[in-house]
Image: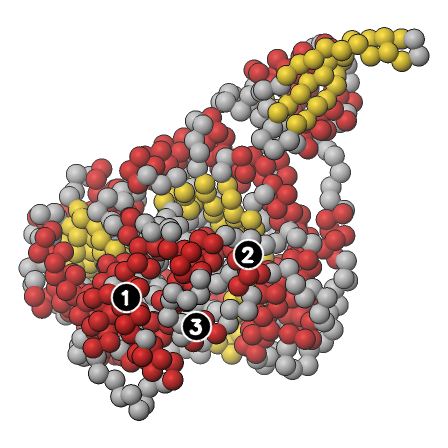
Amino acid sequence: MKDLLLITPPFTQLNTPYPATAYIKGFLNKKQISSYQMDLGIEVILDLFSSEGLQKIFSIETDRQQISENSARILALKEDYIRTMDQVILFLQNQNPTLARQICSMNFLPEASRFNHLDDMEFAFGNMGMQDKAKHLATLYLEDLSDYIVENIDPDFGFSRYAERLGKSANSFDELYSKINAEETFIDHITLKILKEKLDLVQPKLVCFSVPFPGNLYSAFRCAKYIKDHYPQIKTAMGGGFPNTELRDLKDARVFEFFDFITLDDGELPLELVTAHVLNNELSEEAEFKRTFLLENGEVVYKNNSKRHDYKQSEIGTPDYSDLKLSQYISVIEVANPMHSLWSDGRWNKLTMAHGCYWGKCTFCDISLDYIKIYEPISAKILVDRMEELIQQTGETGFHFVDEAAPPALMREVALEILRRNLVVTWWTNIRFEKSFTRDLCFLLKLSGCIAVSGGLEVASDRLLKLIDKGVSVEQVARVTRHFTEAGIMVHAYLMYGYPTQTVQETVDSLEMVRQLFEMGVLQSGFWHQFAMTAHSPVGQNPQEFGVMPVLQEIHFANNDVDFIDKTGIDHGKFGFGLKKSLFNYMHGINFDLPLQEWFDFKIPRTTIHPDYIHDCLVNEEEFSFKANSKVIFTGNNALTNHIVKTKKGNSWNVTQLTFHLKTNIVKIELDQAKAQWLLEIISAYSIENPGKLTLQQLKNLYENNFEDFELFWFSKPVQQLKENGIILSL
């Protein structure tokens, strides 16, 4: 028996649990509140996609005269699907790796329409290995079955969402309310069967649903209805990303037929207060709440009467992934996009470097909400402590830092702390393309295990980047992506089209910028999104300033995405296919020489961007500079010395050859004997393991206590070799 049951309702990710319940459980542990968590989504998927689940699916009668040719084919091959399913799931759970050879034989899995577009398989996966190719084929196999389910069983099904349309911009609760009270679907039966088993096992007093996305909303309500109908003594609560952004203007009392409490923003303190009232059965007018909706006298009320402050990030504890079926998540590869494979392939421990966004100005972003507005970093030491705890708890050394934008200075400190502790970890995160990401910082991040970053290039137009208040230019992005790429860190760019006042010419020029970035090899991955106006962004709050007219509706339920009329009158949606098709080619390193017109079936203007614009940005990178407050880090403390005598025109002198054995190469330099000895002592005293940091000015002072002209030494060819190979880093 537990006090709380924490549930992520269907569906989010297949490869790793959404972290919200793990964050909350870690906090509840510190408060000695007993809880059990479950990812209901993965449990439903595993029940559905099993030999037994498929037998139930195929036993449902269909009109064979009306179904599509694709569904008819799948039905004809049903025995092949049932026979292979359990082994394929084990393979995708990394428990049956030898099946990859069978899958790649192309005569093992039954194939339907998803397999019709495999022309680029060898190109996309030839260098990625058999396991990845097999994962992609197995993913197509599952997607074929998903298509069958959508057509014949449940039109709202999706692997990472369920009935998403009901949650998207649902200003009225009417349609969702009707769906919740309608007959249960096939997916509902599976969901509620598993829910009942867990309720009987845990016997909670409060069930908390974390609803991160619109695609989780319907299932959360369906489950809450089941609890109210069959376990009326159990209280229910909802929190998470969806209510945080969409339900801030909630008015419809019918919502509280299903939920007793809905909390907003950081959930720790609101949930602690709700839990106290539920466990103590105290719900009076004087009861304290933090950012909580509830029903009083038939009316929806918002209570925020607690004077207690939210917990600091350092106080909320380490996420706790216990109870979750970590070994049963399935890794899928839907498309040959390297960043998308990170999102869907492999198990990642989720952590946050800093709450909120340190920039907090982008005009398309929900910067008025606490999850963006309140910026609070965690110390590197606490963060790496949590990493070590999670490694012990989960056995996984991969980390995804889920920041809005990870701060460069904190990333540096985290990287140093990882290296000091000799941890072997793999990690990736989201960033802003700050000029702070120098070549040396990127190299340090790579040394610590960073494999990828994603960041917003958005519209790839300097005028629009200023209008967005992004704080970067295309030239700066080009240089920063080069630094990451040269360090061996993959770069993914979020791209946007259709921003208010964006012209057709600017869309074409943005595409040309993106083409050049890929052609120069400084971007490896990207994705185009069409601009969407949200109620909590500067554009949504002041649309007139951005040349758009909102289509206003009365709000009783959800309020986030806002329909609008762009005063330019441009149909930005028609550019979507061409932008995405061209990007697919560029990511594969092909068709850079095709005119941009070739990607569109309508007339577009010629680009005004010079064909060498990005090349020139990279060539014109800043020259050497002496920044006295830079921190100097020495990574190579394994130098071998060899004293030799050199002669020239009858003169001889002693020099020392220093040989640094790096992981992939050898660096040899020659220095005057005294300077070589001094450098070795400095490297030893201020190695990366030393928590103390030496500034460049302090290094200069130490040098000039013994020698003259530090700048001549610092910019000399031998020292440049050390800097170019990452033996000396200036951060």
Residue 634 percent coordinates (x, y): 59, 24
Left or right of 177 on screen, residue 661: right
Label 2: state its secondary structure. loop
Circle nearer the viewer, 3 or 1:
1
The image quadrant that residue 570 belongs to is bottom right
Real-space CA distance between mark 3 and mark 1, rounded to the nearest whole angstrom = 19 Å
Residue at (52, 58) in percent of width and height? 125
Residue type at mark 3: give it: Arg
Residue type at mark 2: give it: Gly
- The residue carrying mark 2 is 126
Upstream in sequence: badge 1 or badge 2:
1
Q: In the rendered image, is residue 550 in sight?
A: no
Against 610, residue 505 (above or below) is below
- The residue carrying mark 3 is 114
| Identity of the residue furthest to the bottom in this view | 65
Against 308, residue 207 (above or below) is below
The image quadrant that residue 487 belongs to is top right
